[in-house]
Image: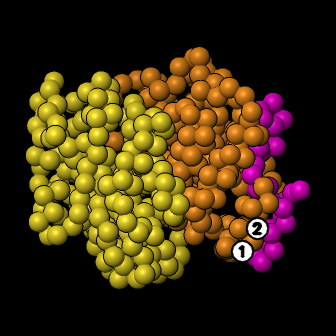
Chain colours: A yellow, B orange
Amino acid sequence: MKELEQRIIRDGKILDNDILKVGSFLNHQVDTKLLVDMAKETKKLFNEEITKVLTLEASGIAFACMVAAEYGVPFVFAKKSKTANLSGELVTAKVHSYTHNDDNVIFVPKEYINKEDKVLIVDDFLANGGALTGLIEVVESCGAKVVGCCVQIEKEYQNGGNTLRNKGYKVVALASIKAMTSNIIQFNE
Amino acid sequence: MKELEQRIIRDGKILDNDILKVGSFLNHQVDTKLLVDMAKETKKLFNEEITKVLTLEASGIAFACMVAAEYGVPFVFAKKSKTANLSGELVTAKVHSYTHNDDNVIFVPKEYINKEDKVLIVDDFLANGGALTGLIEVVESCGAKVVGCCVQIEKEYQNGGNTLRNKGYKVVALASIKAMTSNIIQFNE
């Protein structure tokens, strides 16, 4: 998606440790006009029946919200830590975060995903695929169908996306980075 | 807002400790049709120039996202804990959470709110007003203007909202709860 690629080039910042910072327009301060365009693009890419959108808190929520609104369906976000006002049966999966170098248990109340659901999983970044793998596990544990995964930005040179594609999942990125150095970002066309 | 009140009566659950659980449609699984209606209602209630919407992660993000999209402006969410890919000057405030019974430092990169901004603060719940008070402090520390605060649900029988109104802030709730027992919710008209 050209609009997103150009914005990454203009406003993204690359930090030493292979981290692409897009906080000024994508996942901390969010440009909602760009977000609406990304949601519309996502619906074109997954032009089929979706009954629910699933993501992981917190940076996936805005994208999930707008994508779900585009389809006119609810979205659910998996949480990372148990809070006081949570009750009922939970579906869980373990996720390793390479950004923060720790493990999280993610969970969704079982009642929010039922076995008739056709779920589109969305997230901000795809690198090693830890989050998507965990979210897929959650959906399938509920007996629901994973229609596919759509991420805003994929670091294609890491293994996550292609590992999932090799398993048969449809995984699409709105911007796919082939290579990145401290001052150059090269996109897949 | 009648639509929200009716939904709270239908799908909200009251837990022992004065917690109204709206996770099935408002802040864990989110009904995006209702959310769009709430965003439109918010724009009617704050029919003036807004340049930025601010909220607190994680449960305020969806509402902030849709409200900001309605105005065609960016939104920013304050974070609660320091992450690896954060840099630059931060504006902070201390917030006490009565739900989780702990203190958090919330922060926003200073570059995301500048002194020309006219900020609408939004959140899911307003009870004791800890979150809104912290968010107001963040905006004013940046030298920006707080246009007002809009929350989805206010527990009006707690002190937060009226304390802020007495200080001169415009604080509006889409649903305002006057009294709540284990099985009855009474709204302000």
Please give the residue where the numbered disc 2 appears in the rendered image: B6
Q: Which image quarter: residue A166?
A: bottom left
Residue drawn at (21%, 67%) of the image: A169
Q: Nearer the viewer, residue B93 or B12?
A: B12
Circle 2 Cα neighbour tier, 10 Å, few/some/many (<14 / 14–19 / ≥20): few
Image coordinates for residue B112, horizontal then vertical, percent: 47, 26
Separation of residues labelled 1 and 2 (CA atoms)? 6 Å
Image coordinates for residue A132, horizontal then vertical, percent: 27, 61
Instruction: Please say if B171 is above or below B38.
Output: above
Q: Nearer the viewer, residue A75 or A23?
A: A75
Residue drawn at (80%, 69%) of the image: B185
User: Circle 1 marks a residue in which chain?
Assistant: B
- Amino acid, disc 1: Arg
Q: Secondary structure at mark 1?
A: helix
Image coordinates for residue A2, horizontal then vertical, percent: 28, 35
Q: Nearer the viewer, residue A128 or B14?
A: A128
Circle 1 Cα neighbour tier, 10 Å, few/some/many (<14 / 14–19 / ≥20): few
Q: Secondary structure at mark 2?
A: helix
Bounds of the magenta segment: B161-189
Please give the residue where the numbered disc 1 appears in the rendered image: B10
Label pair 1/2, CB-CB below 8 angstroms: yes
Q: Is residue B175 magenta?
A: yes
User: Circle 2 marks a residue in which chain?
Assistant: B
- Amino acid, disc 2: Gln
Considering every residue shown, the one lying at the far right of the view is B189
